[in-house]
Amino acid sequence: MNRVAQSVSPFLQQLPKVELHLHLEGAIPPETLLGVFRRHGNTEMACLEDVLRLYQHRDFYDFLAHFRTILEWLRDADDLEPITYDVLSNLARQNVRYAEVIFSPGTLLHFHGLDPDRVLDAIQRGYARARSEHAIEMALLLDLTRNMGLEYGWRMARFAAGAQDRGVIGITLGGNERDFPAAPYAEIYQWARDQGLRVTAHAGEAAGPESVWDCIRLLGVERIGHGVRMEDDPRLAEYVVEHGIAIECCPWSNVLTGAVESLEAHPVRRWFERGVRLSINSDDPTLFGTDITRELARLQAAHGFSDGEILHIMAQAVQMSFLPEGGKARLRRLLAEFAVQNGFQTL
């Protein structure tokens, strides 16, 4: 799975950004991860070059194996404090002003018996420091992780519901989509919605359009992560537009996991022109050698998105976010000011 460098314009560098699909564990800077490995005595990861091998993937399942390796070495809840701080600091350097960050405390419970409350406390400490230093805002989405089973899913949903006053805003369903369909999670999702949690799910990445249909019809999601395979069913794209279901689009991730053949083959331009509500995201930026700024630059290079269209997509991301209206209004003002400074009269 190759990586492609991408030049970035000053416009994209300075653009106030929102990211809605970012896995905390997949965004750990390599230097930070090396520190974790050293702290826990991983002799196979003795230098930065060793760590960087984790970022070379043959296919989606190789990527999942590397992701699992990282999770297996997060052995202390306190590891999550510097990780969160470093991840958010990296985002702030790109002028990301708000991020909805996915994390999987139950996998750390599974591997190492880590208390999810302690993990969440450590994340919040890292966030507090980053917010104070960089004025970046974050909300958390808990991943129910399909391949961990329904009992685990229920436990994480209940934990999320009880942590809404500690920065948790909703749930998502990640993991092995091909072998673990969404349908069994319908009751959990109904319960989560009743508790006031916001709901999204990964679908249409490693499985076909039926996976997206299940998440929409059975889980009642507000957003779909990835959704690439909805191209295989024209009725699905029409339904998504008609019902305002938003797509958390992760173009470079989809290339590197083989969900699409190339960036040029990605449906993002067709979606935009059809009126699909989109946000652009980096998914697992460290693992994929990307970030949201380079994602936007690649869209301009491969699909001819203008600066004005990028502004429009970023404004859509604000509206798609699970922020309260007051937070959305602040971000809209930032984008409007930036637009005027760059010669645009409206977003």
Image: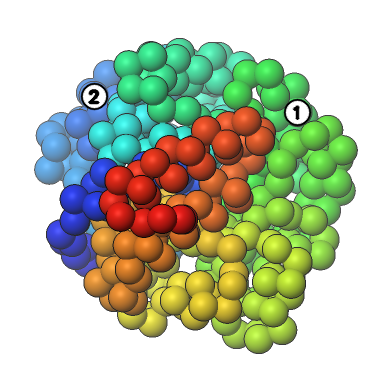
Q: Residue at the location (81% across, 65% down)? A: 217
Residue sitting nearer the eye, 220 or 185: 220
* Residue 174 percent across, percent down from the top left: 58, 51
Residue 256 placement: quadrant: bottom left
* Residue 308 percent across, percent down from the top left: 37, 63
Instruction: Say whether disc 2 or disc 1 marks the residue closer to the N-terminus.
Output: 2
**Please, is residue 176 above or below residue 89 in the view?**
below
**Please, is residue 327 above or below residue 214 in the view?**
above
- Disc 1, SS: helix
- Residue 161, labelled with which disc? 1
Residue type at numbered disc 1 = Ala
Q: Is residue 310 left or right of residue 119?
A: left
**Please, is residue 324 above or below residue 115 in the view?**
below
The quadrant of the rendering that contains the N terminus is bottom left
Identify residue for label 2: 35
Residue sitting nearer the eye, 245 or 340: 340
Q: Tell me, what colour scheme is on the image?
A: rainbow
- Disc 2, SS: helix
- Residue 96, labelled with which disc? none
Q: Is residue 31 left or right of residue 190?
A: left
Q: Which tag is nearer the camera, tag 2 or tag 1?
A: 1
**Please, is residue 274 above or below residue 292 in the view?**
below
